[in-house]
Amino acid sequence: MISSLAYSPIFGIPAVAYGGLTTLILLLITAYIGHSIMSGQGKFSIKIHMGLAITTIIFAALHAFFVLSRYLNY
């Protein structure tokens, strides 16, 4: 049931691929904000960085669950 939802095509691409792309983009934005904070050039606070990091971890965990649902027969 879950794997059929995760691998249902949206514009010809499985839905789980969009989750992976979103997770990657969130990871890159989080890294950029962290780098700008450490170099002193950013106008971001550490709260924004930490909130985005937590959001990235949640998206990555959901993405992993949906990918593994196919192999665990959920």
Image (cartoon, rainbow, N blue to C red):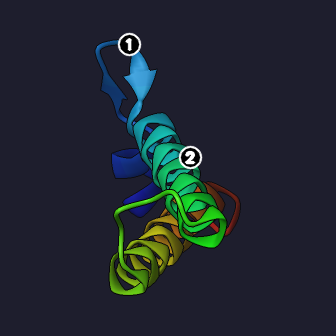
The secondary structure type at the circle numbered 1 is loop
Q: Compared with residue 32, is residue 2 higher up or lower down, i.e. above or below?
A: below
User: Which mark identifies residue 24?
Assistant: 2
- Residue toward you, 74 or 20: 20
| Residue 50 percent across, percent down from the top left | 45, 84
Q: Is residue 43 left or right of residue 56?
A: left
| Residue 47 percent across, percent down from the top left | 35, 86
- The structure residue drawn at horizontal position 44% and vertical position 66%, both measured from the top left corner, is 59
Q: Amino acid at mark 2?
A: Leu
Q: Compared with residue 3, is residue 74 higher up or lower down, i.e. above or below?
A: below
Whole-number angstrom distance, CA of label 2 to CA of label 1 = 20 Å
The secondary structure type at the circle numbered 2 is helix
Considering the image in quadrants, where does the N terminus appear? Answer: bottom left
Q: Amino acid at mark 1?
A: Gly
- Residue toward you, 48 or 60: 48
Q: Residue furthest top?
A: 12
User: Which mark identifies residue 12?
Assistant: 1
